[in-house]
Image (spheres, rainbow, N blue to C red):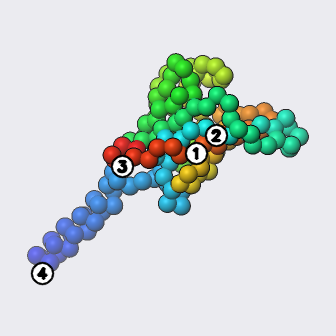
Amino acid sequence: MERILKLSVIIVYAILLKSCSDDDDNATINGSSIHGTWQLTESYMDTGDGTGDWETAEGIYTYTFLKNGTFTSSQFSKCNTGTYVLNENQLTLNYACDTLDEPLKIADGKLVAKIKYNESILELTPIEPACVEGCGYRFEKTLITTNGDK
């Protein structure tokens, strides 16, 4: 009886350890992963009257999100790496520098956005810093790798 009890405890611990593995992917929505490289394709700007529309983006840049919680970006010339946190429908980007350069001047190197995505489209709506009249950015997934990092 003691042997069965010990075996049961070992099995329960094994199941618990497996469920806590680092392979868990909390960066998914409906089975779609944020991991990979995303290129800006469209931007939304509104003057505040609700007549804004999505237009082909100028100043194309990319984000690459890795499974280890880091990202790279070509958006800012002097700061292009950092860490990210994805909680439900909010993405927080913590750049590895104190300030971000043009077109935004952000003192703490942190951007927060509402996020929607699927396997091929990612949409960001800035929360911090917020757009006064309304804005958004659409990205298309451009690079999918299988090396375990992306």
SS state under label 1: strand
- Camera-near label (2 vs 4) is 2
* Cα–Cα gap, marks 2 and 4: 65 Å
User: Residue beneath label 3, please?
Assistant: 146
Q: Which mark is residue 1?
A: 4
User: Residue beneath label 2, please?
Assistant: 41
Residue at the spot 82% in from the left edge and 41% down from the top edge: 52
Amino acid type at circle 4 is: Met
Q: How many marks are shown on the rendered structure?
A: 4
Work out whether mark 4 precedes mark 3 in sequence or the reverse, and give the earlier one.
4
Residue at the spot 56% in from the left edge and 54% down from the top edge: 118
Work out whether mark 1 precedes mark 4 in sequence or the reverse, and give the earlier one.
4
Amino acid type at circle 3 is: Thr
Give the crowd class for mark 1: few <14, some 14-19, many >=20 residues within 10 Å: some
Give the crowd class for mark 2: few <14, some 14-19, many >=20 residues within 10 Å: some
Left or right, 9 with reference to 110: left
